[in-house]
Image (cartoon, grey):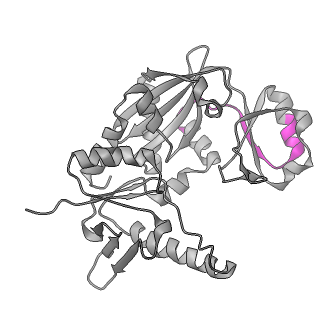
Amino acid sequence: MTEEKPVLVATEADDITADMVITELNRRDVPVVRFNPADIGEDLTVSARFGPCPASAVGQVRTPSRTADLARVRAVYWRRPEWPTFPHLSPDDSRFAAAQVRYGLGGTLYALNGPLWVNHPLRIAAADYKPGQLALAQQLGFTVPPTLVTNDSAVAREFIRTQGEVIFKTLRWTPYARDGVPVTGWATPVTADEIDDSVRVTPHLFQARVDKVADVRALIVGRHTFAVRIDSDLLDWRKDYSALTYTVEHLPHRVDKALHAYLNRLELVSGSFDLAVDRAGDYWWLELNPNGQWGWLEAETGLPMSAAFADLLMQGDRR
């Protein structure tokens, strides 16, 4: 009997969401090779050969307990992998070594042209630019709140005075700490009086506040849509999960169709969308997370999200 083709799962050591999908794959007797790029060395090795005969990478990814033949991988689930930082090396050596891992291990995996990617890292990176997200959302007919990206303090103040209630949002989440304490950039209200010349240091994203009654997190997995209404009194519902209530939402066909078209344009097979619902019941575009969290929503609603990911990864053919 021919051995089943494995699914590669690239993620950090503690990833409950990946665990849920792997459990589903295990139930179906699909072999899984889980690894974290940060483990490169004794706990992770990669070997690949190119040319003149192979059309793509031929080789192996090996962990202490599993080996994946790169020519036989059916799918790659690129969840939350960590790249090594090599703190024991000098700054120059650590930068050099980290680059070799990204372009060696990463480049070898990116060269695979047979398996289905959920999602391909280069497509994730391209989809993660919020100005591009906003432009594409508008092209596809979504209602987009008036938004300004600028490092001009005068332009920012004028926008806020014109729009009235405005919020500030980060253009990209990055690890950040003050006095050793991690902090997160929530969506926060901002007034014109708060804008000073420090805005000139870097572009900022300002957006008119939507008069919303609820939020919606919509997860798309292949052809499946899972939408959950999130009720709270919070501007940014991520600030307090204990204050949230959840209801399964059934999106209008035109909204659902536009979300799938959005992913198709970005060459993604999955994504987590954030929408706002106003008092008239209309949906407003907020943003896409091409690799967003969803595990807690399955626990809260019973929606079969992990099973949908397992189904998609089992198919194993490229989109």
Q: Position of residue 110 (x, y in %)?
A: 42, 66
Q: Position of residue 7 (x, y in %)?
A: 30, 57
Q: Quadrant of residue 93?
A: bottom right
Q: Nearer the viewer, residue 118 or 268?
A: 118
Q: Position of residue 234 (x, y in %)?
A: 67, 25
Judge from the rendering whether residue 157 lies leftward or rightward of residue 209; answer left or right.
right
- Whether residue 259 is visible here, answered yes or no, is no
Q: Above or below — where is 246 with respect to 28?
A: above
The residue positioned 61% from the left and 43% from the top of the image is 135
Asked if the magenta segment contains residue 153, the reply would be: yes
- Whether residue 145 is visible here, answered yes or no, is yes
Q: Quadrant of residue 260?
A: top left
Q: Nearer the viewer, residue 112 or 8?
A: 8
Judge from the rendering whether residue 177 lies leftward or rightward of residue 277; answer left or right.
right
Q: Above or below — where is 211 with respect to 76?
A: above
| Quadrant of the snapshot with the N terminus | bottom left
In the image as oriented, which residue stretches furthest toward the top? 280
Look at the image and give the residue range highlighted in magenta.
Answer: 139-158
The residue positioned 47% from the left and 68% from the top of the image is 39
Asked if the magenta segment contains residue 68, the reply would be: no
